[in-house]
Amino acid sequence: MRQNFELTPLPSLFLVVGVIIHVLSSTLELDSQWHLVSHLFYILSAIMGFLIPFYNVMASLISLLASGLLSFACYNANLISIWTPIVIVSGHIFGIILNIISSSRNETR
C-alpha cells in the first residue's frame, strides 16, 4: 500500500516563511504589521498540522517531528518565542487525538 505524503512539508514550510518574514522585518525595521504577518504563518502551520491527520496519520507524525524540531531549533536560535513551538506542536497533537477518536467511533458503528 502506497502512502501519500504530499501535505507533510506544509507546516514546516509555513513556519520557515513566518521566521523569514519575522527576521526580515526585524532586520529592516519594517512596520509592526509584518510581525503580524509572520504570526499568521505560524498559525497556518498549526492549522495544517491539525488537518493533516485527517488525511494521513503517518504523514502527520512525520510532520509533527519535522516542524516540532524546526520550531524548537528556531526558538533556541532566539528567532521566535516559546509560544510558537507550543502552538505548532499542539495543533499537530490535537489533530492526531481527534483523528484517533473519530476513527475509533467510526469503527464501533
Image: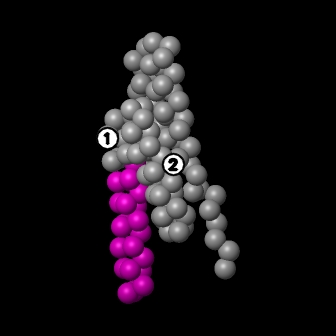
Furthest toward the front, the residue is 77
Residue 77, visible in the rendered structure: yes
Report the predominant secondary structure element of the magenta stretch. helix
- Which tag is nearer the camera, tag 2 or tag 1? 1
Magenta-tinted stretch: 88-109
Picture coordinates of residue 96, whole percent (x, y):
41, 65
Instruction: Identify the disc placed on residue 83.
Output: 1
Q: Residues within 10 Å of mark 2 (few under 14, many from 20)?
A: many
Picture coordinates of residue 104, whole percent (x, y):
38, 80
Instruction: Identify the disc placed on residue 21.
Output: none
Q: Residue at x 64, y 58 (%)?
A: 6
Furthest toward the bottom, the residue is 108
Amino acid type assigned to the residue bearing label 2 in the image:
Pro
Q: Of 37 and 106, which appears nearest the observer? A: 37
Q: Residue at x 47, y 58 (%)?
A: 65
Dots 2, 1 in contact, CB < 8 A: no
